[in-house]
Amino acid sequence: MSEADKMLHGIGYMKEYEDSSVEVWNYEERFCIRFNKICKSVDFRRKEKRQFLGLKYHRISIDMQELQAINKKVEELGWVK
């Protein structure tokens, strides 16, 4: 298990694999992080229960440049060492 997998597992995520992506789910929170290997993007999805409408997904997607910028900003803010 990689260091990232251990970190994700430690915060409640379970890893699931697909052909072109890796998904990690937090089933309690109904939240998914999907690493798309083809597009090299990270997608965030949350399932929400809607009365009489079943499940609805909210999706947010960022690319690697956005992720690097987010990581850099977090570093500059002193949130990580």
Image (cartoon, grey):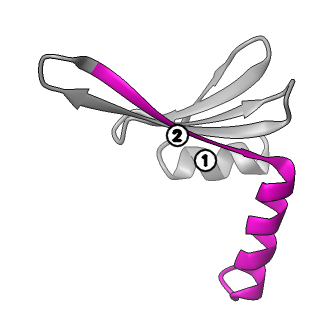
Residue at image position (70%, 77%) is 74
Q: Which residues are magenta?
A: 55-81
Name the one closer to the observer, 22 or 10: 22
Element under disc 1: helix
Picture layout, residue 50 above or below residue 26? above
Q: Which mark is residue 13?
A: 2
Q: Report crowding for label 1: few under 14, some 14 to 19, many 20 or more residues within 10 A (C-alpha).
A: some
* Amino acid type at image mark 1: Leu
Q: Is residue 74 magenta?
A: yes
Name the residue beneath numbered marker 1.
Answer: 8
Locate residue 35: give its quadrant: top right
Q: Which mark is residue 19?
A: none
Q: Report crowding for label 2: few under 14, some 14 to 19, many 20 or more residues within 10 A (C-alpha).
A: many
Which tag, 2 or 1, sits closer to the chain's start? 1
* Amino acid type at image mark 2: Tyr
Picture layout, residue 72 above or below residue 37? below
Locate residue 55: give its quadrant: top left
Q: Is residue 61 magenta?
A: yes
Q: Position of residue 24 (x, y in %)?
A: 59, 33
Q: Position of residue 73 (x, y in %)?
A: 75, 77
Give the residue furthest to the left. Answer: 51
Kindly check if marks 2 and 1 are in contact, taking CB atoms under 8 A apart as contact: yes
Residue 43 horizontal side relative to residue 4, left or right: left
